[in-house]
Amino acid sequence: MKVFTFLKVSALVMLLLAGCTPGQEEKRAVVENENPPAEGFNVEGSDPKAIVIADKVMEAMGGRRNWDNTRYVCWNFFGARELIWDKQTGDVRIESYSDSTIYILNIHSMEGSVMKYGKEITQPDSLAKYLERGKRIWINDSYWLVMPYKLKDSGVTLKHLGEDTTQSGLQADVLELRFENVGVTPENKYNVWVDQETSLVRQWAYYSNDTLTEPGFILPWNEWKQYKDILLSGNRGERELSDIMVLDTLPENTFLTFDHVILPGVE
């Protein structure tokens, strides 16, 4: 008992000498791991338990290293458009069926080109407007696909709301995501149900404003599948993200011309 007390006091002294209270050290400990938060993630405002669960989600999907090393992600958004995203460079290609528009842009530099109804848009103001629209499309569509990889993103505050069952009856921990000064809709809020057995996201609820108590929708995250070294889910119940691919190479003209792109392995 005396030895235990000594060790406990010694640990506390070390914390104090380091300038951290036990609570601060706990929060620091849960982020000093193989899944560090993005710059601007609200560590102090987030629950330590929520952060631990977020790390388990990342591990269950393949781990941070595999996610960081993923190069090209391709998918079809609800049958409305096709997207090709270079995670390493920020290059994005979007082919929108409804308005016959092709966007090719870099989401960091906001440089790129757009073709609508077979005609390239060259007027600077119009081009800038369409490039901004392309980025907004990518922000929305990619979040529907890779949200669980972004639980510790810049501007996010994570809270653990307790335990609950999903609509399909799975026991889950519920996380709340709030946002500050990020994205195009920082007023949004999400609740995310994390399967306690697999640590995979199984359901989410969307709130258009973080003051609302009733969600705009509650949809499942079903049919998690292996794509190279990571897991992704495309089944959102009544909605479907299809043609999901993770690739190491693409045709050279993917982000250079409006010509149709034939992806590796696709006839």
Image (spheres, helix red, strand yellow):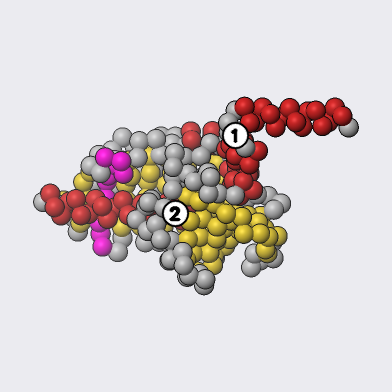
| First in sequence: mark 1 vs mark 2 | 1
The percent coordinates of residue 255 (x first, y second) are 29, 40
Q: Is residue 164 visible?
A: yes
Q: Which amino acid type is shown beneath numbered disc 2?
A: Phe
Residue at the spot x=55%, y=60% of the render? 191
For image coordinates 60% across by 39% down, the residue present is 24
Residue under numbered circle 2: 179
Magenta range is 99-109
Q: Residue at x 65, y 38 (%)?
A: 22
Q: Nearer the viewer, residue 131 or 54?
A: 54
**Residue bearing the label numbered 1:** 20
Q: Is residue 264 above or below residue 190?
A: above
Snapshot quadrant of residue 192: bottom right
Q: Residue furthest right?
A: 1
Residue located 54% across and 33% down the image:
65
Whole-percent x, y for residue 197 in the image: 71, 51
The relative height of residue 208 versus residue 12 in the rendered view (above or below) is below
Q: Which mark is residue 249?
A: none
SS class, disc 1: loop
Q: Is residue 108 magenta?
A: yes
Q: Is residue 26 magenta?
A: no
Measure the alpha-carbon separation of dots 1 and 2: 27 Å
